[in-house]
Image (cartoon, rainbow, N blue to C red):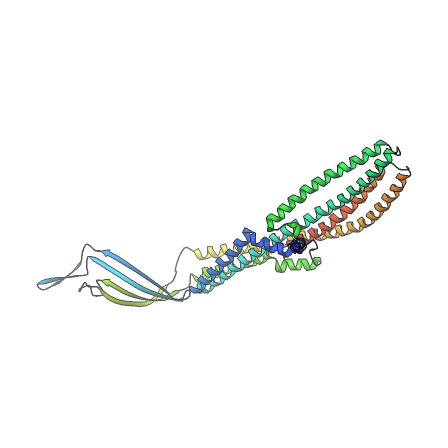
C-alpha cells in the first residue's frame, strides 16, 4: 500500500492533454447532443430509403344510409344495398414513378446527415480549444508564480542579511523597511496569482472533470505556416463544409419541387371484406379484391413552382455570400494571429538579452550595495527587474501556445 501511495502521483502526472480533451467531449452536453443528432439524421436517411418500397395499410369504415335503392320488378320490389354498411380493407401501394422525388429525398437526407456531422466536428473543435486554452493559461499563471516565488526567496535572503547588518549598525533602518515592503508587495502579487490559479483549475475541472495538476505539463501545440493554414481553412473547416452542404441541399430541394410537377404514378391493390360485399342485392358479408394504377399530374397552381424555385435560388446566393465572408474573416484572423506569433517570437529574443543584462545589473548592484555605492532600493529594483523579465519571457512562451491554439481553431483543427 505504501508503494502504491508513493508512486500514484507520479503515474497520475503522466496523463496527456489529449485524455483531458476526450474526457471533455464525453461530458459536454452540446457535443453529446450532436452525436444524438447524427443518429437521428441516420434514421431519417434510412426512412427516406425505405419510401421507395411498397407499403401496406389496413382500415375500416362504417356508413349509414337513410335510403336504399329500390329496384321495381313486376309484382315486387327489391332493395339494393343496406342502411348499415361495413367495410374492412387491406391495401398495398407501390410507387412506380413520382418525378424522382424519392431519389432526391434520399440525397437530401444524406446531406442533412453530413451537416449534422460537420456541426459535431465544430463543437469538438470549440471544446478542444477551450480545454487547451485553460491548460496553457494555467501554465502561464504557474510560470508567473514560479518567478515571483524565486524573487521572494531572494528578497528574504537579502532581508536576512540586512537584519544582521542592521544589528551591527552597518545599514540604515530605511533599508530594512524598504526590503520588508518589497516582500509584502510580492506576497500580495502571489496571493492574487494563487486566486487566479485556483479559478483556472476549477474552470478546467468543469470542462473535462480532471484535476489540472495531474496533466502532463509538456504538451505543446503544432501549427504550419500561413499558406498551409489558409489552405486548410478553405479545404477542411466544418463551417465551410456545412455551407457547401446547405447549398447542395437547396439544389436538391429545387429538384424535389420540379419533381412534384411531373406525373405521379403508383400501383395499388386492395382486399376488402364488407357488408354488403360486391353484390348489393344479397346484402351479405363478402370478400372482394380491387387493384389498378393511380395517376396524378399538377396542371395549374398559380405559378407556385416558379416562386418556390426562386426562393431556393435566393437561399443559395445567401449561403454563397456567407461562405465568401467566412473565408475573408478567417483570412483576416489568420494574418493577425501569425503576425502576433511573429511579434511574440521577436519579443522573446529581445527578452533573452534583457534577462542577461538584468542578471549582470543585479549582480553588479549587489556588489555595489555591499560597498555602499548604491542604495538598497536601487538593488531591490534591479532584482525585481530581472525576475520581471524572466516572468515575462515565460509568459510569452505560453502566449505563443495560446496563439497556436487560436490558429488551429480558426482553421478548424481541434485535436
Residue that extends furthest to the top in the rendered view of this protein: 173
The spot of residue 372 in percent (x, y) is 90, 37
- Whether residue 137 sits left or right of residue 266 in the image: it is right
- Whether residue 406 sits left or right of residue 258 in the image: it is right
- Whether residue 189 sits left or right of residue 102 in the image: it is right
- Whether residue 371 sits left or right of residue 253 in the image: it is right
Q: Quadrant of the C terminus?
A: bottom right
User: Is residue 235 at least partly visible in the picture?
Assistant: yes
Residue 25 found in image quarter:
bottom right
| Foreground residue among 341 and 81 | 341
| Residue drawn at the location 83% of the way across and 40% of the way down | 158
The spot of residue 215 in percent (x, y) is 66, 53
| Foreground residue among 339 and 220 | 220
Q: Quadrant of the N terminus?
A: bottom right
The spot of residue 342 in percent (x, y) is 75, 52
On screen, 401 above or below 48?
above
The spot of residue 412 in percent (x, y) is 62, 56
Q: How many marks?
A: 0
| Foreground residue among 410 and 133 | 133
User: Is residue 323 at least partly visible in the picture?
Assistant: no
On screen, 97 above or below 161?
below
Residue that extends furthest to the front in the rendered view of this protein: 1
On screen, 166 above or below 301?
above
Amino acid at each position: 500500500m505504501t508503494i502504491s501511495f508513493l508512486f500514484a502521483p507520479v503515474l497520475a502526472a503522466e496523463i496527456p492533454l489529449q485524455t483531458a480533451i476526450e474526457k471533455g467531449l464525453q461530458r459536454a452536453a452540446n457535443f453529446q447532443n450532436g452525436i444524438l443528432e447524427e443518429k437521428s439524421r441516420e434514421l431519417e436517411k434510412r426512412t427516406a430509403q425505405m419510401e421507395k418500397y411498397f407499403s401496406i395499410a389496413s382500415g375500416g369504415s362504417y356508413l349509414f344510409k337513410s335510403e336504399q335503392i329500390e329496384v321495381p320488378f313486376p309484382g315486387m320490389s327489391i332493395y339494393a344495398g343496406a342502411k348499415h354498411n361495413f367495410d374492412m380493407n387491406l391495401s398495398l401501394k407501390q410507387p412506380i414513378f413520382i418525378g424522382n422525388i424519392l431519389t432526391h429525398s434520399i440525397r437530401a437526407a444524406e446531406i442533412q446527415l453530413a451537416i449534422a456531422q460537420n456541426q459535431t466536428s465544430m463543437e469538438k473543435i470549440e471544446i478542444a480549444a477551450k480545454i487547451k486554452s485553460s491548460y496553457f493559461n494555467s501554465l502561464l499563471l504557474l510560470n508567473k508564480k514560479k518567478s515571483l516565488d524565486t524573487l521572494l526567496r531572494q528578497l528574504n535572503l537579502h532581508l536576512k542579511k540586512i537584519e544582521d547588518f542592521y544589528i551591527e549598525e552597518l545599514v540604515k533602518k530605511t533599508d530594512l523597511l524598504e526590503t520588508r515592503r518589497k516582500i509584502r508587495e510580492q506576497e500580495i502579487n502571489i496571493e492574487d496569482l494563487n486566486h487566479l490559479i485556483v479559478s483556472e483549475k476549477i474552470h478546467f475541472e468543469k470542462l473535462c472533470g480532471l484535476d489540472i495538476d495531474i496533466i502532463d505539463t509538456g504538451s505543446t501545440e503544432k501549427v504550419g505556416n500561413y499558406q498551409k493554414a489558409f489552405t486548410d481553412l478553405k479545404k477542411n473547416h466544418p463551417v465551410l463544409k456545412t455551407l457547401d452542404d446547405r447549398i447542395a441541399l437547396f439544389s436538391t430541394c429545387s429538384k424535389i419541387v420540379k419533381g412534384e410537377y411531373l406525373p405521379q404514378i403508383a400501383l395499388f391493390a386492395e382486399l376488402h371484406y364488407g357488408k354488403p360485399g360486391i353484390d348489393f342485392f344479397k346484402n351479405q358479408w363478402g370478400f372482394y379484391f380491387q387493384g389498378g394504377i393511380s395517376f396524378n399530374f399538377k396542371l395549374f397552381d398559380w405559378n407556385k413552382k416558379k416562386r418556390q424555385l426562386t426562393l431556393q435560388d435566393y437561399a443559395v446566393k445567401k449561403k454563397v455570400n456567407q461562405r465568401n465572408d467566412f473565408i475573408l474573416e478567417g483570412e483576416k484572423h489568420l494574418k493577425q494571429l501569425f503576425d502576433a506569433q511573429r511579434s511574440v517570437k521577436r519579443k522573446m529574443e529581445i527578452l533573452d538579452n534583457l534577462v542577461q543584462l538584468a542578471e549582470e545589473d543585479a549582480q553588479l548592484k549587489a556588489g555595489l550595495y555591499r560597498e555602499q555605492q548604491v542604495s538598497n532600493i536601487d538593488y531591490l529594483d534591479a532584482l525585481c527587474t530581472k525576475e520581471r523579465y524572466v516572468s515575462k519571457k515565460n509568459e510569452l512562451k505560453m502566449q505563443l501556445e495560446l496563439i497556436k491554439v487560436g490558429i488551429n481553431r480558426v482553421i478548424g483543427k481541434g485535436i
